[in-house]
Image (cartoon, rainbow, N blue to C red):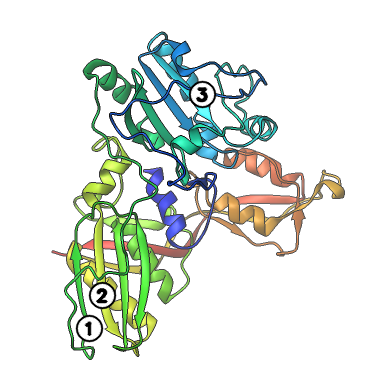
Amino acid sequence: MKDIYKLIVIVIGIHCSVEIAVAQPISVQEVNLPKIGQAVEDLPIGTLLNGKQGKKLSSYQRDLIVLDFMTSTCTNCLASIPKIKKLQELYSGQLKIIPVAYESGQIMIEALKRSGNFDNLSLDFVVNDTVFNRLFPHRTVPHLVWLYKGKVAAVTYGEYLNQKVIEELLGNKTIDLPIKDDYREFDYKIPLLPRYTDSTRSYSGIMGYLEDADTKFGVQVDSLDATIRDYAVNVTALPFYFYCYGKIHEIPFMKPSRIKLIVRDKDRFIHNPEVELFEEDWKIQNSISYERTSRLADKPADRMVAIIEDLDNWYNVRTSFVKQKIPVWVIKEGRAATEQPEQMRSFVSDFAFMADLNVDFPPLINEVDKNRKMYAGKWDSFESLNTLLRRSGLQLIAEDRETAVFLMEERL
């Protein structure tokens, strides 16, 4: 469920490295890229995190090798290190997972230490990579390349690295997974619907998932026809709604406690791993593509209202933002600080903003001066956050407070 809220962060314009980190830019024309089913040259893997030179791929003598591309800014990648170690132990002799980073060893060591995943790191971790990033170009990480007996078996998102997929590949010698392709060729400027010639009227349409296209929102102006085209390609319902409502009025960060779904089938709107294990498969099943062409003179808010009406009709729901009382955490002034002033370097407003992005906790509201500074450190609960704030003379209060909530109700 967490991943859908990560996507929402991107849609409403809050950019956070928790979702994805951009990998080193690479031109896909630079090399002859191996495709699914093709053999990969038996190359030396390059410099390792411990400073030694790695051996050739064939030296591992494993049926399955997974190249796990990551960067120092991808928190999901760094957090996956314990899982990688556990899988290698579980499939010892059959599987080798090789983390690959184009950044230097020093940068990656510092990032791993910050994440708490550097101790007892026994992985063959490639750094300063100049080979595999060119051979398997990508724009986002995690990015996984699966090599079975020297051939490319799959190229996937990070979520597919689990026991189910590994056992399927080792048992059946093949797997059929959605291909992660960061260089898809799709012309978003071409209308999805037949073009009408009457520019005095608006028209719209909804269709399903489109192959060879990424998730994208866009606006296209045709000054000759005096029309404006709003479109969304391969988007799921909640991010689309928040995109539209966010163009009408300011909306808060949409974490789970701010979303109320009164519908029979919530799995259409929120990924449920108990129903569909992989979020990427769920997206393919539940994404829509949409287009609306309006008159250029129409106000942006009016266009968004019309799109919301179309979505409500499509999903047979009524949606709105309402005021409801929900549990929140409030940062307030407290007793005297115990931390030295020179250690209080972070603005409380910045800290509160980033802390509020954590979907596992209630909305966080800052009620102290925006120029107030504090000591910032790690926390993972109400108690630990309150302890941290007290060092700076602050306190955390839990209460129910009326705040903006997205409400979706199914029509009878």
Circle 2 SS class: strand
Indicate the amino acid at tag 3.
Answer: Pro
Task: Give 303 or 391, whichever is nearer the viewer.
Answer: 303
Residue at x 49% of width, y 23% of height: 98
Percent from the top left, x then y, of residue 315?
Answer: 19, 62
Indicate the amino acid at tag 1.
Answer: Ser
Label 1: which residue?
202
Label 3: which residue?
82
Q: Is residue 254 visible?
A: no
Q: Earlier in the sequence, mark 1 or mark 2?
A: 1
Circle 3 SS class: helix
Residue at x 36% of width, y 75% of height: 220
Task: Give 303 or 169, whichever is nearer the viewer.
Answer: 169
Percent from the top left, x then y, of residue 283?
Answer: 28, 48
- What is the CA distance from the residue labelled 1 to the residue labelled 2? 7 Å
Task: Give 327 or 170, whichever is nearer the viewer.
Answer: 170
Label 2: which residue?
292
> Quick one: label 2, few (<14), some, or many (20+) residues within 10 Å?
many
- What is the CA distance from the residue labelled 2 to the residue labelled 3? 46 Å
Labels 2 & 3 near each other (Cβ < 8 A): no
Percent from the top left, x then y, of residue 328?
Answer: 52, 54
Q: On the image, which quarter does residue 242 sit in?
A: bottom left
Residue at x 41% of width, y 44% of height: 2
Labels 1 & 2 near each other (Cβ < 8 A): yes
Q: Earlier in the sequence, mark 3 or mark 1?
A: 3
Percent from the top left, x then y, of residue 223?
Answer: 35, 87
Q: Using residue 125 as the reference point, say whether residue 186 is left or right of it.
A: left
> Quick one: label 1, few (<14), some, or many (20+) residues within 10 Å?
some
Task: Give 165 or 309, whichever is nearer the viewer.
Answer: 165
Q: Earlier in the sequence, mark 2 or mark 3?
A: 3
